[in-house]
Image (cartoon, grey):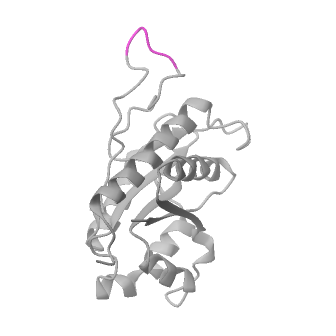
Amino acid sequence: MTVKLAVICHSGYGHTQAVADSVADGAKSVSDVEVSIINAADISGPESPLLAELDGVDAMIFGSPTYMGSASAVFKGFMEASSGRWMEQKWADKLAAGFTNSGSMNGDKQNTLIEFVTFAMQHGMAWVGLGQMPGNNHSGGSNADLNRCGASIGCMTQANVDEGGDVAPPPSDRETAMAFGARVATAAKRWGTTDA
């Protein structure tokens, strides 16, 4: 049985796109999983054909930079455009997960993930967390550890603001994102398709 997974993201400067690509690569590493990446900026309103495409997936992974302690305005546009789907509960029982990136190690990224959780719960979706122990939290740890930001409800990454998306976030964050994508894909296979 093939399951369909979509990564819906917005990236302002290329850093969050790099994370989205890593998440998608991780999901693609799981057999019988079809993965697509959708730019949230391409969903301009409730009649967008991309929303109809999302109706047919089994799992969605939301991704946005954290700007001013919140998801980007572009990503919120996608959220608001989905309100017709909410009215009909078209996405109920699909899996959902999320990731976010900021320039600061903290950057109030937790708030963005909580926005994503709330969004998913309003749609009647089931949430999948990061599923990784925190890294770099003891004297023997390092920035090379997976989950160096210590997240749990979703994937958090950090990118130095003076470096481009080709360099930042660092390899450990990209590996964290890949493992996260694989986890969500595996959960989607276990959960089954929403077509049944």
Q: In the image as oriented, which residue stretches furthest toward the top?
A: 139
Vertical relation: 45 (above or below) 192: below
Magenta-highlighted stretch: main secondary structure?
Answer: loop
Vertical relation: 86 (above or below) 108: below
Q: Place residue 139 in its image quadrant.
A: top left
Report x, y in % for residue 94. 32, 69
- Seen from the viewer's position, the closer of residues 189 and 60 is 189
Magenta region, residue range: 138-142
Q: For the point 33% across and 29% down, which residue is it? A: 133
Q: Quadrant of the C terminus?
A: bottom left
Q: Is residue 165 magenta?
A: no
Report x, y in % for residue 168. 66, 37
Report x, y in % for residue 41. 62, 72
- Seen from the viewer's position, the closer of residues 177 and 31 is 31
Report x, y in % for residue 93. 27, 71
Classify residue 142 as left or right of residue 91: right
Q: For the point 58% across and 68% down, which residue is it? A: 38
Residue 80 visible, this angle: yes
Q: For the point 50% across and 17% down, which residue is it? A: 142
